[in-house]
Image: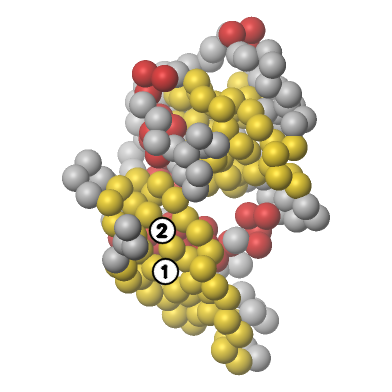
């Protein structure tokens, strides 16, 4: 795997919203496959937001992963600490990677609670309350582990910014023991939006990082 880089905020005090599952849209099929191939299963579901809390079923703080965290149903096929990609289908390309830190009784596999920061990162005002989402579990994210590695570096390098989008833009085999992967990230604060190109060079035989860099690039409109 890759070196551990930690950037911890103090855990936010607050409460965990546990909505009545009967208020959810009964017409959302928890097994509706939105995008399916041999590598991934994306299901359409719904998300609410939460302020989080100090105690979780996973013993992981809601402040993990820069508050990009979530709670899932007790019977959902997601493990504590697992990464899930959550996308907003109403805004193409708007997605976040969240870490599972808690569970919610009564939720089905396509119902999820997002920390308020993750909810807002999907381009939605908190007053909306509930939105449709696309949920993509591993193993696809395992194939994108270098994108997640650089995502964590971006979060450290740009405190106070939210990552609204990230996409793989290329993979190059430099030699038998060096591979370069590049990803673009769109981050946003209250005053500006920045596009960043991240590059990581690693040894594919050992999964060790050789070098990485971040460069701000101009938006193409």
Q: Which residue is located at x 65 percent, y 44 percent?
A: 136
Location of residue 71 (image quadrant): top right
Q: Nearer the viewer, residue 147 or 130?
A: 130
Percent x, y of residue 145: 58, 62
Q: Which residue is mark 1?
A: 198
Percent x, y of residue 44: 66, 32
SS at badge 1: strand
* Crowd band around label 1 with a 10 angstrom C-alpha radius: few (<14), some (14–19), many (20+): many
Q: Nearer the viewer, residue 27 or 162?
A: 27
Q: Which residue is located at x 39 percent, y 68 percent?
A: 197
Vertical comparison of 184 with 47: above or below: below
- What's the distance in space between the residues labelled 1 and 2, CA to CA? 8 Å
Please state, as top left, top right, bottom left or bottom right, where the N terminus lies in the image: bottom right
SS at badge 2: strand
Q: Which residue is mark 2?
A: 185
* Crowd band around label 2 with a 10 angstrom C-alpha radius: few (<14), some (14–19), many (20+): many
Residue 162 visible? The answer is yes
Left/right placement of residue 157 relative to residue 132 reads left
* Label located before the other in sequence (1 or 2): 2
Q: Which residue is located at x 70 percent, y 39 percent?
A: 34
Q: Nearer the viewer, residue 73 or 133?
A: 133
Percent x, y of residue 159: 28, 51
User: Looking at the rendered structure, which numbered label has been put on residue 127?
Assistant: none
Percent x, y of residue 123: 40, 36
| For the residues bearing labels 1 and 2, Cβ distance under 8 angstroms | yes
């Amino acid at each position: 795997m890759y070196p551990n880089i930690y950037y911890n905020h103090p855990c936010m005090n607050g409460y965990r919203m546990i909505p009545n599952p009967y208020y959810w849209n009964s017409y959302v099929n928890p097994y509706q496959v939105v995008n399916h191939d041999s590598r991934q299963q994306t299901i359409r579901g719904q998300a609410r937001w939460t302020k989080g809390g100090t105690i979780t079923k996973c013993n992981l703080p809601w402040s993990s992963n820069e508050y990009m965290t979530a709670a899932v149903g007790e019977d959902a096929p997601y493990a504590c600490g697992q990464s899930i990609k959550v996308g907003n289908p109403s805004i193409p390309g708007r997605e976040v990677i969240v870490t599972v830190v808690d569970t919610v009784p009564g939720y089905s596999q396509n119902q999820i609670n997002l920390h308020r920061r993750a909810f807002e990162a999907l381009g939605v005002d908190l007053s909306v309350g509930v939105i449709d989402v696309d949920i993509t579990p591993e193993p696809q994210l395992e194939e994108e582990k270098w994108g997640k590695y650089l995502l964590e570096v971006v979060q450290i390098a740009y405190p106070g910014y939210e990552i609204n989008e990230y996409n793989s833009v290329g993979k190059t085999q430099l030699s038998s023991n060096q591979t370069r992967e590049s990803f673009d990230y769109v981050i946003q604060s209250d005053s500006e939006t920045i596009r960043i190109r991240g590059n990581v060079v690693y040894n594919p035989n050992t999964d060790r990082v050789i070098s990485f860099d971040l460069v701000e690039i101009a938006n193409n409109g």
